[in-house]
Image (cartoon, grey):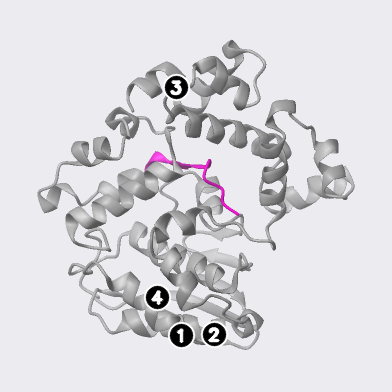
Amino acid sequence: MKMRDISVSVYFARAVLKNAVAQGLDPISLLRKTRISPRLLLEDNARISVERFADLQVNTMLAMGDEALGYVSRPMPIGCWSMMCHAVIGCETLGQAIARYCRFYQLFEFGVHPHLVIEGDEARLRVVQVDTEARTDPYMVELVLFNGHRFSSWLAQEHLPLQRVELAYPPAAQIPEYRAMFLGNPVEFEQENSQLVFSSALLDRRVVQTEQSLRHFLRHPVLLMLTDSYQHSSWTTRVRERVHQNLADMPELNDVAAMLEVHPQTLRRRLSAEGTTFKEIKSQVRRDTALHFLGKQGLSIEEIAHRAGFSESSAFIRAFKGWTGVTPYTYRKGL
C-alpha cells in the first residue's frame, strides 16, 4: 500500500538544496524542473507533496553526482545505494542485513559511518563521526537514520517499531516533522549519540524481499521509502487511512473508532501516546490531499476543496492559507 498524498515541510527541501550552490548548481532551476515553486522555500510553514520532494532529492543527487548531497567530506558516487541494496538483499535476517548495511558504508571514508550496537535486549543503529575535524550536519545524520529505518522496514515488510530516536543536536524543524519522519516514534534531542534504539528481538525478523522485488524498489527508492505502508502500522497510520478513505463524508473520532473496533477513549489514548490527536490527523489528511491535487492539471479549486473534505471553497481557502501561508491560487500559480 502507498501513501502518495502526504506532504513534507519545506525544511527538508531547503536541506536537500543547501550545498547545491557550492557545486555550481542553480537551486531555482532544480526546483522548477521538479515543479516546486521557488517562493515556497521562503515560507517557513510551506509544505511540498511527497512525490515532488522525492523527485527533488533524486534530481539534486544526480546533478551533484553525490548521493550524500554535499554533506560529507567527499562525494558519495551515484550507485552506492544500489550496490548496498544488492549486497544486503541475500541476507536471511534483519540483523545480518543491518550489519551488512553498516559494513558497506564503513568501507568508504565519507566522514560518518553507521554502526550496529547490540547491548542485551536493546539494539542501536548509531551514526558515528569518523572525521573529527569536521562537524556533521544534522540533515546527513537524519538521512542515514531515515534510510536505515525505512530500508529495514522494507526488507521485513513491517514498519519496525522504535523505542526512541536520539539526536545529538536541537531540532531545526518543528518536532512533529521529526516524529513523522520516524513514523510517530518518540524523538529525543540533544542526546549523547544520534541513533535509533529498538528491541534486539527485531534483529531475528526474516528478510522477505528478493532480487526480483529489489528491481522494482530501485526504480524510485526515495519515493517508495517515503510512501510505503505495511500491515503492522501505527494507530496514527490506521486512523489516517480511514479518514483518507472517507474524506467525502468526513468521519468523526467515534466513527473511526468503530471502524477500528476499539473504544473511542482507547483510540484517543493510543493516538496521544503516539504524540498526536484525531483533530490533527484530520487536518493533516485534508492538507496533504489538497497539496496532492493542486499539482494535478484540470481540477478546479472547488473540486479540490470537495476532494479534501470541505463542503465550501471559502472554508478550504482559509484552511489552506493557515497551512501554507498562501492561498491555493497562489500556490498553484507557482507550480
Left-right relation of 59 to 44: left
**Which residue was labeled with disc 3?**
298
Residue type at tag 3: Gly
Residue type at tag 1: Ala
* Mark 3 and mark 4: Cα distance apart in space: 39 Å
User: Residues at badges 3 and 2 in contact (C-beta under 8 Å)?
Assistant: no
Residue type at tag 2: Gly
Q: Residue at x 49, y 34 (%)?
A: 292
Residue type at tag 4: Cys
* Mark 4 and mark 1: Cα distance apart in space: 13 Å
Give the crowd class for mark 3: few <14, some 14-19, many >=20 residues within 10 Å: few
**Residue 183 vs residue 58, the one in the foreground:** 58
**Residue 7, percent across and down?**
49, 41
* Mark 2 and mark 4: Cα distance apart in space: 15 Å
**Which residue was labeled with disc 4?**
85
Q: Residue at x 47, y 57 (%)?
A: 224
Q: Residue at x 42, y 85 (%)?
A: 100
Residue 216 colored magenta?
no
**Residue 188, percent across and down?**
54, 60
Camera-near label (2 vs 4) is 4
* Mark 1 and mark 3: Cα distance apart in space: 48 Å
Range covered by the magenta-colored residues:
1-11
Camera-near label (4 vs 1) is 4
The quadrant holding residue 231 is: bottom right
**Which residue was labeled with disc 2?**
95
